Image: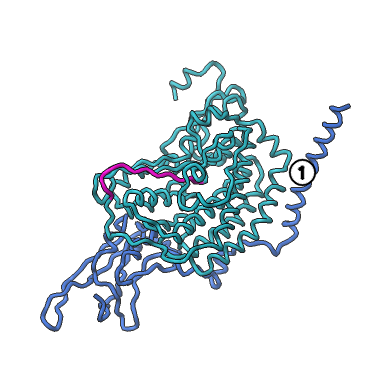
Chain colours: A cyan, B blue
Amino acid sequence: MIEELSTTEQGDLVINVGPQHPSTHGVLHLVITLNGETIKKVEPHLGYIHRSIEKMCESLSYRQFIYVTSRMDYLSSHINNHGCALCVEKGLQIEVPPRAKVIRVLMDELTRLASHQLWWGAMAMDVGALTPFFHAFREREAINDIMEETCGARLTMNYMVPGGVMADIHPNFQRKVKEFLSFFHTKIDEYDELVTDNVIFKNRMAGVGHLSPEDAISYGCTGPTARGSGVSCDIRKLYPYEVYGDLQFEEISEKGGDCFARYLVRMQEMRQSIKIIEQLIDNIPGGEHLAKTKAVLKLPKGEFYSRVETARGEFGVYIISEGGTTPYRIKFRSPGFSNLSALDHMAKGHKIGDLVAIMGTLDLVIPDIDR
Amino acid sequence: MAFLTTYLKDVLGGVRSLLKGMKLTGYYFTHHKEIITQQYPDNKAELKLPERFRGEVIMLHDEKNEHACTGCTACELACPNGTIKIITKFDVTPEGKKKKALDTFIYHLELCTMCNLCIEACPTDAIKMAQNFEHSVYDRSKLTKKLNNPGSKIREGVE
């Protein structure tokens, strides 16, 4: 702290936002240097929720380590588990049954919808509108109920296992998802009516927190954050996994690069997720939901990498195996960490009130950043 | 003049967007039927959790106080957190042979993350996830549970 103070100019103010400040997400600690109300520097301090998940995984078997990844990006827990299962399957060269592939994609897209709904509510709350939060949670509850019925949990599912999915879908699953979609179609228009078209919201978002495509690439931003700057980086399109290659959907990208562009990307992604679910929900192939695997999984010696598109961007799993029952080293590439690194660049020169809007559009999940 | 027109358009458009949002808020304010809040714990009687909901691990006993656990420790090995500890003993069969059997099934609820891996691993379906989710107790030691009933023994024919 003393060093930081000495490097700042006379009259600058250094304040701490977080780790318990209600407007920051989770336990993020930001040290902000201010000149009046203008931000000169934003420095995120990490480590408050570090659980050394990568190290923990080294002592867990290839079946066991997947449940830990639900605790990283807890809003995309299905997709995190999916990435890990894909990596183990790559090492073992297991062919996943077609039914499991479709169920996995359906679950991923439902998770993406739930995550974006929470983001929409939380971000509107960040910029001062409380009502959207309740609207978003009403719809998210429907998804949570669907998850609860099929997977047995609402947030940390641990449903994807190497070789497929843990259990077959619940008999009510298809009916409930269809009910939800017909209900959500009208609600997403309400979202636009309530927030997107609102003049106050638009003025707070447009032109704030600009990120150029070059900067987005050099900071390693992925997901809606990068696509808001016009960078094409959707893993589902670029490196299709499971059945994404056969599906009709668009990669959303906006040219603006400001907060409003990032907001629009996520809003349109919700519509694309609905489109994907509609294509699959009536076409779930029959057969097994789980491929036959050995009782003890042993990955051959070597290095394996797989990536998936979470609600926040690219999630990568890198496993080094020495041929044993546990990984030698696991590295997770989490989207939140890279997206957060661009915060200083985006917030510089803006007023402190805009910082909250910028953070809102980054969609930060702190356990994902700290691991 | 052109400036004035755009200015007025902006103002009117802005007011209209606000009214649109307020109309929606007003609709929900006056339509109480669509309130979906659950009045927990008042609705405890009708609150029904899905069959697959993971609340806690239980061991299934039939009316004769018999279970299906052979003490094979597959669940103990599958658990990522050391939640389960199985103590085995040696029963003597009528033929005079020694046979491994379950003595105590210890379950640490405070360590459990409800990942369902033990249930998946069990070869005889002796354990199951129960729907009880209200786990708060005043003493931490109460969270360490013995799952097999006192005096229970293994069901005949389960290997």
With B73 as the anchor, is A205 left or right in this view?
right
Residue shown at the point (35%, 49%) measured from the top left: A90
* Residue B9 vertical position relative to residue B53 in the rendered view, above or below: above
Amino acid beneath label 1:
Ser
Q: Is residue B87 visible?
A: yes
With B55 as the anchor, is A25 left or right in this view?
right
Q: Secondary structure under badge 1? A: helix
Residue B68's image quarter? Answer: bottom left
User: Depth check: A159 or B110 in front?
Assistant: A159
Across and down, in percent, residue A302 comes to 28, 43
The chain letter for the residue carrying disc 1 is B
Residue B26's image quarter? Answer: bottom right
User: Depth check: A111 or A234 in front?
Assistant: A234
Across and down, in percent, residue A359 comes to 56, 37
User: Depth check: A300 or B65 in front?
Assistant: A300
Badge 1: how crowded within 10 Å, few (<14), some, or many (20+)? many
- Magenta span of residues: A299-310
Main SS of residues in magenta: strand
Across and down, in percent, residue A192 comes to 69, 47
Residue shown at the point (42%, 58%) measured from the top left: A159
For disc 1, the marked residue is: B17
**Residue lying at the far front of the rendered structure:** A246
Quarter of the image with the C terminus of chain B is bottom left
With A71 as the anchor, is B67 left or right in this view?
left
Residue A141 painted magenta: no
Residue shown at the point (37%, 57%) measured from the top left: A163
User: Depth check: A28 or A117 in front?
Assistant: A117
* Residue A69 vertical position relative to residue A39 in the rendered view, above or below: below
Across and down, in percent, residue A111 comes to 52, 53
**Residue lying at the far left of the rendered structure:** B96
Residue shown at the point (62%, 40%) measured from the top left: A263
Residue A346's image quarter? Answer: top right
